[in-house]
Image: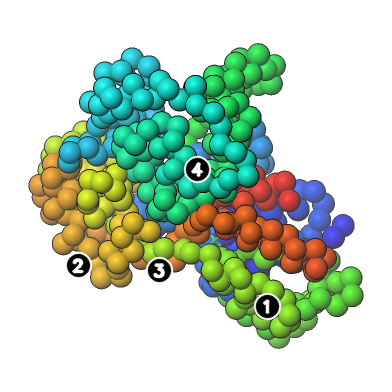
Amino acid sequence: MRHIAIIGSGITALARAWQLTRQGHRATVLECSDQIGGSIRSHRQGNYLAEEGPNSIQVNSHEVDAFLKSIPGLEERVIRASDEAKKRFILRDGRPHAVPMGPMSAITTPLWSLKGKLRVLKEPFLPPIDPELEESAADFVRRRLGDELYRYAINPLIGGIYAGDPEQLSLRYAFPKLYALEQAHGGLIRGAAAKMLASRKSEMPKVDKRIISFQDGLAELPSLLAAALGDAVQTSVLIESIEKAHEAWKIRWNGEEHSYDQVVLTTPAHALSKLPLEPPLRKALAFLEAVDYPPVSVLSLAFKRSEVIHPLDGFGVLVPECERRSVLGTLFPTSLFSGRAPEGEVLMTVFIGGERQPHLATPDTPALLKTVLPELKSSLGVSGEPTFVHHKHWSRAIPQYKLGYGRLLSQMEAVEQDYPGLRLSGNYREGISLSYCIEAALMA
Ligand SMILES: Cc1cc2nc3c(=O)[nH]c(=O)nc-3n(C[C@H](O)[C@H](O)[C@H](O)COP(=O)(O)OP(=O)(O)OC[C@H]3O[C@@H](n4cnc5c(N)ncnc54)[C@H](O)[C@@H]3O)c2cc1C
């Protein structure tokens, strides 16, 4: 049995601690703030439920599925997104258009022109890129699918996932599965076909792919994990020093020194070199301050159902950069999950800022409303004033895996080799989605 200290209490830390505990090890989670969950925060106000960070988890693998099922009490609290979640909208010429879900709707959709659709047919015949070359996500999509699909499919999607700039994000590191699909199968359509065939032939039970949240919001996930971990989770901790001493790690916190076999650092990348580490290690981690986390404002707004013309019958609407709007995207939580707003009202979660327009993300709620409300009026037909407003400003929201990120990943490995028993983990390393954070915590 080993005793492992885990610094931070986001999903990476809690999933890792729970996995270690289940494997018979001892984990101690040390969180500096009085809240657990890191970016996962749900705000309940009467019958309104606003998510300040992530809105849902996409369960795509057996590993994540089994992990979630292992958490005591989770099955009674979990809620599954309605089937409407499959429908997504993209704004074009100021109007939301449903993203096609099958070949027939792809042919008939007004979201893309005939020329744009015909260009996609070339995709299976294009060669893969030389693996020596690193390409931006934007260049990759333009090369394989053409400019229109880039502008009216992938550009808004990347704005929605990363709040990022596709011209700067590295395809290989920000979207490793897409990169691997091209390298392994020669292209996206060939890769998708091969995967479909393999999954049909496979005798493995199919994953119950689903989008989930909880009755009282996503923050129930860290709460349930913390309850299962008991006093292994410590909040409001003041860490005074972290030092390597022969085979052990000595951590002094809240005035006492404790000894651990390993230490896992899961704070955001920019916070690592501010930890009270021994000076050479702190210096060795300083390169991670360069990881960019653009600001994002998350505005939750409720309206009377009768004062919104759009049926909001989907996951939400994403806004391409070329539409020149202030909003990155708007989610429709009341269409996905019950218990998000009072009867007769709808809730929207609006994202502003990111790499696209960092200056628009501001803690100033009235200024945001002035920007956002006219856009909701024109794109979704909102007429009334909001019945509920909740705003969370993230001055540093999501890490950006930009071109050249491979160098940073190699440097992280080098630091771990120099300091046995040290592990760097978190959404700046293993992927930003909650599912990736959980998968990484399970595999570490
Ligand atoms: C606005 C927003 C929307 C998102 N939407 C989605 C979504 O819908 N679906 C999805 O899958 N993902 C989404 N994500 C991404 C996902 O939420 C994050 O990638 C994930 O929660 C990060 O988890 P983490 O544990 O790696 O880091 P964090 O959650 O950042 O946790 C780091 C922890 O370290 C702690 N810490 C910092 N410094 C110290 C210190 N000195 N000592 C001790 N502790 C410290 C922090 O307090 C925090 O608890 C979203 C993210 C944001 C910001």
Q: Examine the rendering and report whether any part of residue 185 can be seen.
A: yes
Please identify, in this view, whether the residue under mark 2 or under mark 1 is nearer the observer.
Answer: 1
Question: For the residue labelled by badge 3, is the local secondary structure a helix, a strand or a loop?
Answer: loop
User: Quick check: 81 above or below 115?
Assistant: below
Task: Tell me the CA gap for discs 4 and 2.
Answer: 30 Å
Q: Earlier in the sequence, mark 2 or mark 3?
A: 2
185 on left or right of 54:
right
Which residue is depicted at the point 48% across and 47% down? 136
- How far from the left and from the top, in percent, is residue 132? 63, 44
Judge depth for marks 2 and 3 and give the one in front.
3
Residue identifier under label 2: 366
Mark 4 or mark 1, which has the lower sequence index? 4
Q: CA distance from mark 2 to mark 1?
A: 40 Å
What is the number of the mark on residue 282?
A: 1
Tag 4–tag 1 contact (CB < 8 Å): no
Instruction: From the viewer's perspective, tell me whether residue 421 is left or right of residue 325.
Output: right
Instruction: Report which residue position mark 4 lands on.
Output: 57
Which disc is residue 395 wearing? 3
Q: Secondary structure at mark 4?
A: strand
Between 444 and 414, the one lying in front of the other is 414
- Residue 62 got which mark? none
Relative to residue 337, is residue 376 depicted above or below? Answer: below
Q: Nearer the viewer, mark 3 or mark 4?
A: 3
The verdict on label 4 being within 8 Å of ligand 1 is: yes
Q: CA distance from mark 3 to mark 4?
A: 23 Å
Q: Mark 4 is on which residue type?
A: Ile
Residue 265 picture location, percent across and down: 67, 66
Query: Is residue 224 at least partly visible in the picture?
Result: no
Secondary structure beneath label 1: helix
In front of the other: 10 or 118: 118
Query: Dot 2, crowdedness within 10 Å: few (<14), some or many (≥20)?
Result: few
